[in-house]
Amino acid sequence: MASITSASLCSLLFLLPFLLLQLSDLHVSEAQNVPIAKGLSLTFFDTTCPRLESIVRKQLEKDFAEDIGQAAGLLRMHFHDCFVQGCDASVLLDGSASGPSEQKAPPNLSLRPQAFKIIDNIRRQVHRRCGAIVSCADITALTARDAVVLSGGPDYKVPLGRRDGLNFATAQATLDNLVGPSANTTEVLRRLARKNLDVTDTVALSGAHTIGLSHCSSFTNRLYPQDPTMDQTFAKNLKTSCPQNAQVDATVFQDIRTPNVFDNKYYVDLMNRQGLFTSDQDLYTDSRTRGIVTSFAVNQTLFFEKFVIGMLKMGQLNVLTGTQGEIRANCSMRNSDNTLLSSVVDVAEEAGQLIGF
Ligand code: HEM
Ligand SMILES: *[C@@H]1O[C@H](CO)[C@@H](O)[C@H](O)[C@H]1NC(C)=O
Ligand SMILES: *[C@@H]1O[C@H](CO)[C@@H](O)[C@H](O)[C@H]1NC(C)=O
Ligand SMILES: *[C@@H]1O[C@H](CO)[C@@H](O)[C@H](O)[C@H]1NC(C)=O
Ligand SMILES: *[C@@H]1O[C@H](CO)[C@@H](O)[C@H](O)[C@H]1NC(C)=O
């Protein structure tokens, strides 16, 4: 009797780590098939900045309690960072003597000014606690992940270890790398294929438009004259929000069903011809992507799985690692442009001289 008990106890103890491993890995099971870029790691800051992820999460919980719309701004920031010159936080740089930055580039993208502040505020807290060892690019990737999670979307582990870029992307690079909202599926697929994103990745990542806002100017070409692929009532309401020749460029929700929730309703919108941009709606019109749209509209779990895969691929585009680039002390400027930093360094050096180094 005793031996049976201890035998089963033994096998339970033997199995326990595997059971726990399986449970904790469930939400990233398929995502694990996405290769991790050389130089990045899922445990990068485990010993050097163990509180990193909780600092990010806690601060964003506060920020989103004030304005959940900022989640969309942060998600889009990561997309724009990664697509132009790789995920190197170049999007965060203020324009400088070296030329117009991505922020100021023509499809300046109406990135939310507050998103820049949120990222640098978190950077400041992280650097205060751990030293200046975490890049603005990593913080941007973490805020995008948490934007998804805190809006109701899937959780996933972010490979970390990105370094910040030293170079601004030119306005031309910004134009060349970002797709416009009036692009059709052929064009969208072509552009995203250049980033090694396949058809499923493209449809899944477009699902980010389940949260956030768009300015009227991004889609009024579909209202005046009215795009026949657009639902009549939807078009009528959009025309009310976005009158022709309006003085101000108003904003509307991207997902009319659940505007602030990260869910699969974006695909339901598309099936009802209530997508905002041509780049959205054409995913349902085009036979190559229609089936994927439908599969995500009926199965949110499937969408979440594919979205995470897309985010992991996008989040590792052309990353700088190791000794490349730098860890910026202020996300909006390169260290070499940071006069505050050089004055701090001077002071430290003077202090060193005073105590006899
Ligand atoms: C496939 C090509 C894409 C096109 C053509 C596109 C285009 C746009 C446009 C025109 C806007 C509205 C900007 C404005 O008028 O204020 C927008 C908003 C947004 N996009 Fe995309 N986008 C694309 C892909 C993505 C991806 C891959 C993501 C993230 C994974 C993303 C996330 C967002 C978010 C969250 C917003 C709302 C931003 C806010 O509320 O501040 N988009 N996008
Ligand atoms: C974006 O650029 C356009 C034209 O280049 C400009 O009119 C607009 O004010 C800019 N918007 C932002 C938010 O910088
Ligand atoms: C899609 O857009 C491309 C580039 O703008 C254009 O050449 C092509 O004819 C369009 N395809 C369809 C099916 O409208
Ligand atoms: C939805 O997708 C998930 C993930 O791929 C799959 O396991 C599940 O069987 C699908 N559910 C249905 C009802 O098809
Ligand atoms: C970072 O630099 C910008 C100017 O580019 C400045 O406005 C901001 O105050 C700086 N942030 C910190 C925390 O010093």
Image: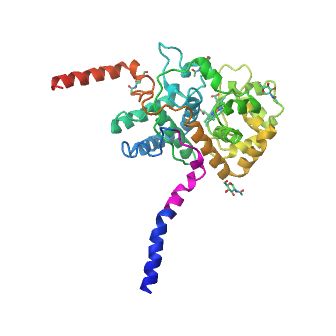
Quadrant housing the N terminus: bottom left
Tell me the residue at 53%/55% (across/down): 25
Q: Is residue 251 above or below residue 300?
A: above
Residue 276 magenta-highlighted:
no
Tell me the residue at 52%/32% (across/down): 319
> What span is in magenta?
19-37
Position of 41 with respect to 341 (left or right) is right
Q: Regarding ligand 1, which quadrant of the image does it lie in?
A: top right
How is the rendered protein coloured? Answer: rainbow
Position of 10 with respect to 86 (left or right) is left
Tell me the residue at 73%/42% (across/down): 269
Outermost bottom residue: 1
User: In this view of the protein, can residue 277 be seen by the observer?
Assistant: no
Q: Is residue 202 above or below residue 219?
A: below
In percent of width and height, residue 40 lies at 48, 39
Outermost right residue: 228
Label the magenta part by its dominant secondary structure.
helix
Residue 30 magenta-highlighted:
yes
Residue 225 or residue 88, whichever sits in front: 88
Dividing the picture into quadrants, the one containing residue 288 is top right
Residue 223 or residue 86, whichever sits in front: 86
